[in-house]
Image (cartoon, rainbow, N blue to C red):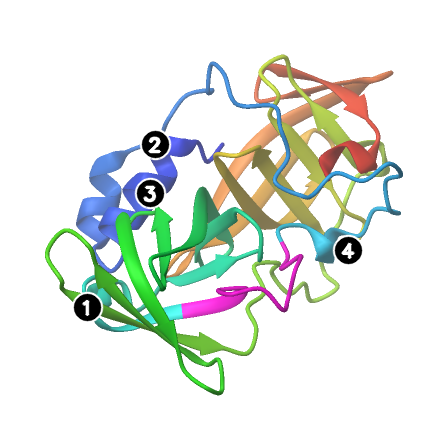
Amino acid sequence: MRRTLISILCAVMAFGSAAALSACGSTSKTESSSSSSSVPKTTEKAEFNMANLFSVQYADADFAGYWKISDGKGSQLESFVFEFDGKETAYMLAGTMGYFAKYSIKSEGGKNYFTTQMFGLDGTYSYTISGDKKTITLTDTSDNSTSTLTKIDSYNSIPKTDGTEKIDDALLGAWQDDTGEILYFDKSGVMLDLQKNISFTFYRCSAEKGNLTQTYLIKSETTDTATYSVKGDTLTYNNYDYKRISENDIM
């Protein structure tokens, strides 16, 4: 089952509530998505490495890294991890799923300011960073309420596989449909469903003889099923067609 933006937002709001998540139901194919990538562009594309997707790009910048809201506004989202790439792209992470956002920082009048539309941190804040750079105190410019971000060492959205996964060789590689949505199948048994600048989901996946099972994690694991067929450079996945693309076009 394809995880669209609506699915992601339902997961965000219903995290910890199985009944609420169930009420969101399944969603249909997304009609459109943005085509630009969050990864900084260079004149030459690096060799594709799935582990580098959605990673921190500028580690020395303010906010760069992985954070949790440990106190104040948004602290009810303690199960979520907020990632900032060090430039402008942010992700709200839960299990093997992620939701894209943008952020900006600037200095004005002797203060540093942070602005984002990310769920749980929506707004403009002045901020201070602790000497060890492991804590950020945010002060909301609209009401002077404060929030505390605490840095964590790392986060990995890619699920672990146990070697029992079977992947049809015909599926391996990257595929894109006419809305820009990308599916990627790795020989390790990991599948990626990416809607650039909207959301991504990694799955533990097995596929053979036209049938596919895919397991993702939010609070607990959920397994979906799908059908597929491959003819030449066309993948038909749950009755939607995708064309083969280069793995480097994912980045």
Pick whichever of labels 3 and 2 is earlier in the sequence: 2
Question: For numbered disc 4, what is the local secondary structure?
Answer: loop
Measured Cα–Cα span from mark 1 to mark 2: 29 Å
Residue 240, by quadrant, is: top right
Instruction: Report which residue position mark 2 lands on.
Output: 6
Real-space Cα separation, disc 1 to disc 4, in angstroms? 43 Å
Q: Is residue 146 visible?
A: yes
Point 77% across, 32% down: residue: 249
Callout 2: helix, strand or loop?
Answer: helix
The quadrant holding residue 145 is bottom left
Question: What range is drawn magenta here?
Answer: 55-67
Instruction: Say whether disc 3 or disc 4 marks the residue closer to the N-terminus.
Output: 3
Quickly name the residue at label 1.
146
| Residue depicted at x 67% and y 25% | 228
| x and y, in percent, of residue 63 in the image | 48, 64
Nearer the observer: mark 4 or 2; the answer is 2
> Does residue 221 sit above or below 240 in this rendering?
below
Name the residue furthest bottom.
132
User: Amino acid type of disc 2?
Assistant: Ile
Q: Few, some or many C-alpha atoms within 10 Å of disc 3 (few <14, some 14-19, many ≥20)?
A: some
Q: Looking at the picture, which amino acid does disc 3 mark?
A: Gln
State the CA–CA distance, disc 4 to disc 2.
28 Å
Residue positioned 75% across, 64% down in the render? 163
Q: Which residue is label 4 attached to?
A: 188
In this view, the mark in front (3 or 2):
3
Say which amino acid is labelled 4. Ser
CB contact under 8 Å: marks 3 and 1:
no
Towards the viewer: 48 or 201: 48
**Pointer 1 or 4: first along the chain:** 1
